[in-house]
Amino acid sequence: MTAPALRLLPEQANAPVVVFGGTFDPVHLGHLRAVGALREALNAERVVWLPAGEPPHRPPPVASAAHRLAMLKLALADEPQFSIDTRELDRPGPSYTVLSLGELKAAYPDQSLCLALGLDAALDLPKWHRWQEILSLAGIAVMQRPGWSLPEPLPAWWLRAQLDPHDPVPESEGWVRVIDIPPVDVAAADIRTDIASGRPIETKVPIAVARYIKEHELYGENLRA
């Protein structure tokens, strides 16, 4: 793997940097639309996509790191506000978010970090490695889809950190804000099932990604990349 790729953009005062991690196995239109809405809602300068190498909280990816990175590059090729950071692919061992945030904090010393999480992942945050340090390094943007509702009661740590939806994003860390994102009925697991069953996926992933998957015969029945 090459060194982490950080595509630096012109500086924008007080604009947060959104960190969006995942296996991207494969990256799909749901990822792109959700992150686009999140960036707009937070007035973020950029989004750093952070592909996981060995995710500690979920099964290992099906496609190799090289294939997942190649598909991500294709998907983001025309998105100047998005960059890819490969540090979790390059680092041996589990892809602990707290380690990456610490390194990214050093890379962006003058900007606040915002970690983008789905609702389930946010609720499970106390199960993560050194989770309290995560809150000391970044704010948390919880992506909520239409029809989803927050559980009652919310965890105490969440309530202490929660911002009003209309509050500006602070320059400090340790906050939680719920962001509504567009409804997109797309999931990577379903895409892999579609491929194994011979169903088309061109409406679920970028065309360049669909072509790459076909060319490299990824996610076929009984096939591991």
Image (spheres, rainbow, N blue to C red):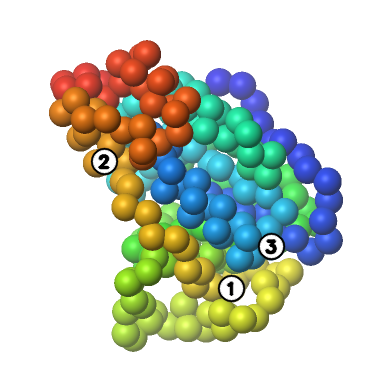
Front residue of 52/208: it is: 208
Above or below — where is 5 with respect to 171?
above
Instruction: From the image, state whether disc 3 or disc 1 is nearer to you.
Output: 3
**Which residue does the numbered mark 1 point to in the structure image?**
175
Mark 2, other Cα within 10 Å: few <14 / some 14–19 / many ≥20: few
Place of residue 172 in the rendered image (x, y in percent of width and height, measured from the top left): 70, 70
What type is the residue that disc 3 sits on? Asn
Place of residue 202 in the rendered image (x, y in percent of width and height, measured from the top left): 36, 32
Q: Which of marks 3 and 1 is nearer the N terminus?
A: 3
Judge whether residue 18 can be spotted in this image.
yes
Place of residue 137 in the rendered image (x, y in percent of width and height, measured from the top left): 62, 61
Q: Earlier in the sequence, mark 2 or mark 1?
A: 1
- Would residue 128 be found to the left or right of residue 88 on screen? left
**Mark 3 and 1 residues: CB-CB less than 8 Å, in contact?**
no
Q: Earlier in the sequence, mark 2 or mark 3?
A: 3
**Which residue does the numbered mark 2 point to in the structure image?**
189
**Which residue does the numbered mark 3 point to in the structure image?**
43
Quadrant into which the C terminus falls: top left
Residue 46: assigned label: none
Q: How far apart are marks 2 and 3 (CA)?
A: 31 Å
Front residue of 70/98: it is: 70
Front residue of 1/22: it is: 22
**Mark 2 and 1 residues: CB-CB less than 8 Å, in contact?**
no
**Residue drawn at the location 83% of the way across and 46% of the way down:** 10
**Residue drawn at the location 28% of the way across and 37% of the way down:** 191
What type is the residue that disc 2 sits on? Ala
